[in-house]
Amino acid sequence: MDSFERLQKRYADADSRFAECNGFNVHYKLFGDGEPLVVLLHGSFLSVRSWRDVMVPLAESATVVAFDRPAFGLTSRPVPSPDNQSCYSPEAQSDLVVQLIEKTGHDKAVLVGNSTGGTLALLTALRYPAQVQGLVLAGAMVFSGYATSEVPAFMRPMLKVMSPAFSGLMKLLITRLYDRNIRGFWYNKKLLSEEVLVAFRRDLMIGDWSRAFWELFLETHHLGLEKKLYSLSVPTLVVTGEHDVTVKTEESFRLAEKIPGAGLEVIPDCGHLPQEEAPAAFVAAVKSFLKRSVKVC
């Protein structure tokens, strides 16, 4: 057993599960049964913990899966191999989502993504339309941030060679700025307890976490999602916190306008993480969407 497997066993919860998907040992949790399958994709610097207050309520009318994305939480953090150099790329992560859907015994799912998790949910729907039967995009990065950033191709070979040094620098910066960055996701910062903040920090900073995050960064490239939105054919709900400053509310309004037939839900007194800051309102919005658009009884 390697060192990360020992950490997985040490920190796993009683309801933790693991599945091999696309070169990763993926940590996930599953609640409920029946159709539809709802897959929850958290944002960067967070983990499956981000869905702790909504997983069980959503599972009252669906099967719900929440998982730790590559580079986060208890999902393994392999260094890319020669035959799988791009395992942390957005495309590889969308492949992983589809594999996880299949591992749960389903052939399609409603994807609920927050922040960069919303980016990946949208990308997966565009790449695998037959496997995605609905989308909920909460503060999704589509016109900025992860979806539009790019590491220039000519720089990647040099950056790869320098990975140990640069991942060490990234570790220093993230460690120093982590608490302030996470607090910035909240509108009412009093709702973020010190206990939860410490738990999120631990979820991220496990094993060789900075190297995994560096590999994720190296695979960042402009996804060109805006030009593809017109072709999206699945029912979609765009959710935004009224006071989201990470992905400004105007970007979510624009996203809802550009996706054919998309609905829009603005959650008041809330920032970038509606599932955490206003879980009851978030659950109500998602359940209403499922009942209206995915024919949940």
Image (spheres, rainbow, N blue to C red):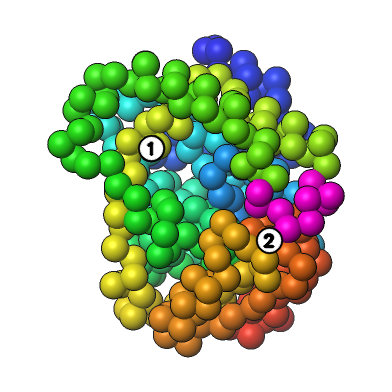
Residue that numbered label 2 is attached to: 271
Mark 2: secondary structure: loop
Mostly what secondary structure, the magenta segment? loop
Is residue 6 highlighted in magenta?
no
Image quadrant holding the C terminus, namely bottom right
Mark sitting earlier along the chain (2/1): 1
Q: Is residue 217 above or below residue 274?
A: above
Which portion, as a residue range, is magenta?
184-192
| Residue 60 shows in this picture | no
Query: Comparing marks 2 and 1, which lies closer to the viewer?
Result: 2
Image quadrant holding the N terminus, namely top right
Residue that numbered label 1 is attached to: 217
Residue visible at 71% across and 72% down? 267
Left or right of 96? Residue 244 is right
Counting from the top left corner in percent of width and height, residue 84 is at 27, 32
Residue visible at 67% across and 22% down? 9
Counting from the top left corner in percent of width and height, residue 104 is at 55, 51
Q: Amino acid at mark 2?
A: Gly
Counting from the top left corner in percent of width and height, residue 140 is at 51, 62
Residue visible at 29% across and 54% down? 222
| Residue 8 shows in this picture | yes
Counting from the top left corner in percent of width and height, residue 34 is at 66, 65
* C-alpha distance separating marks 2 and 1: 25 Å
Q: Is residue 94 above or below residue 172?
A: below
